[in-house]
Amino acid sequence: MRPLACAALFVCLWCGAEAREFTEEEMSAVRQRIKSMFYHAYNSYLDNAFPYDELRPLTCDGQDTWGSFSLTLIDALDTLLVLGNRTEFQRVASLLQDTIDFDIDVNASVFETNIRVVGGLLSAHLLSGRSGMQLESGWPCAGPLLRMAEEAARKLLPAFQTPTGMPYGTVNLLHGVSPSETPVTCTAGVGTFILEFATLSRLTGDPVFEEVARKALRALWKTRSDIGLVGNHIDILSKKWVAQDSGIGAGVDSYFEYLVKGAIMLQDEELLTMFQAFDQVIQNYTRFDDWYLWVHMHKGTVSMPVFQSLESFWPGLQSLLGNMDAAVRTFQNYYSVWRQFGGLPEFYSIPQGYTVDKREGYPLRPELIESAMYLFRATGDHTYLQMGFDALESIERIAKTPCGYASVKDLRDHQLDNRMESFFLAETVKYLYLLFDPTHFLHGGGSEGDGWWEAGGEAGDCVLGAGGFIFNTEAHPLDPAALYCCSRHSRDRQQLRELLLSPSQPPAEAPPTKAPPTGQSETIALKPGERKTPPLLSCPVQPFSARLTVLGQVFSDAT
């Protein structure tokens, strides 16, 4: 069978590629090269494209793409801090506050605005404690970047005002949803909000964001086929599937990603249960020789035997759940394609072992590098560093221009396209840098006295930034500790408000708590809909190894 022969060839290619061991000095030198890559692209954007959304690197000018709000600058803001540039982070944060206006007559993608703008602003807000900026009292539960993120998210809320709760794909930032807007949107466009919207609700105390995100997730969950799969595009009004191809790639990918990461960040068993049900049928119907094909959502028969570059996030996601053997084997397949072309084509025919017509491009996507970062963290295998080094070499050799880095229009002959997507600075460069910096604070590294954690909250009694960051699908890191910190303060304020408004009512006697059986620690797994109330004096964060476990379970009953 042709796919089996191809798979065998790819494994041989992998085995033949001897990964050298990188010394600390070599890794440091690679990090400097990655920084130089970032600043070549970043400065080219500032010099030639700002305030447009994106840089056009072949003509050295700019263009608006997703909404006309200097998207590349918002998307790259937290990367500045990841690279240690506090001065520029402060400057850009102030600049954005002075120049960005969301009250504009622009049709914006609900999905893209959420992951790039809302996610980017939330991440920058949560990392600003490390920037040397003057912080507002009560940070991280207050701050100008948080208010900007909230303002942007409120512009998206009209899209969720549908009978099903599933959002439209596009919204006008000034006028709301157009009466002529199509009700058809992709699966990821319905299910990729819980990270940003739950973070907003927990930080601001306004539950509406998390409520609409959960309603959309639950509505989407109910549309599964009889064999448990979802399609690619759905009519959000009729709940009818318009595109019935089921897979883990374009149009679906981040839906599965957010079920897993939402379960980790929110300690939410409902989301984890949803993903586990999907994972079972994905393995049953779409997995062939550690490739994941596209199948008909109702029949389970193969509809497209292709690999899409966006699927490359999957090995990293599996590593978060401890499925290391499957993650490593699938990564081997994907890396072999990279070695064949010096990049990942958007579509790759598995039976033919070659690119798909009109899908030969590589817009400098980050997903394979992202998986390499997670797998290196999990295994320490320098093969993943070699992949990162290959990526750095390929991008420098193929995509570099005098005005930044250009998307590759055709990997067969390395033709370039006149576009540098904002995710190149938000994701690709960031994941490359973090791959080669295993002691970075985002990995839970650093030492006391080096700003490895911050105090936050109204009384400065919350421990923040001590590890366990969750990356949204645009690589914007979110700190789960901040969510619990602000949720606790919001709950305390509500209890105080109730006490002040009802002074004549004696406080209700708390029911006795049932102690766990002797020898058994309290479970951290919650029933669907249940929320755990932490003790008043608790550390609201777990170490990296517990929160982003790679060898155990996300939820454990005896840890």
Image (cartoon, rainbow, N blue to C red):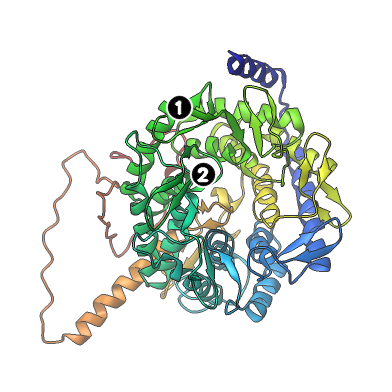
Residue 529: image x %, image y %? 26, 55
Q: Residue at x 13, y 52 (%)?
A: 514
**Which is closer to the viewer, label 2 or label 1?**
1
Please name the residue that numbered disc 1 is placed on.
301
Specify the farthest residue to the front.
Answer: 180
Quadrant placement of the N terminus: top right
| Mark seen at residue 253 | 2
Residue at disc 1, secondary structure: loop
Residue at disc 2, secondary structure: helix
Q: Residue at x 68, y 26 (%)?
A: 336
Can residue 158 be spotted in the picture?
Answer: yes
Q: Quadrant of residue 96?
A: bottom right
Tell me if mark 2 has few (under 14), some (14-19) or many (20+) residues whose alpha carbon lies within 10 angstroms of its own: many
Can residue 43 be spotted in the picture?
Answer: no
Can you say whether 103 is above or below 294 in the image?
below
- How many numbered marks, from 0 up? 2
Q: Quadrant of residue 409?
A: top right
- Image position of 368 (left or right of 174): right
Question: Is 502 or 293 nearer to us in this picture?
Answer: 293
Question: Is 554 or 354 nearer to us in this picture?
Answer: 354
Q: Amino acid at mark 1?
A: Thr
Q: Amino acid at mark 2?
A: Asp
Can you say whether 407 is above or below 373 in the image?
below
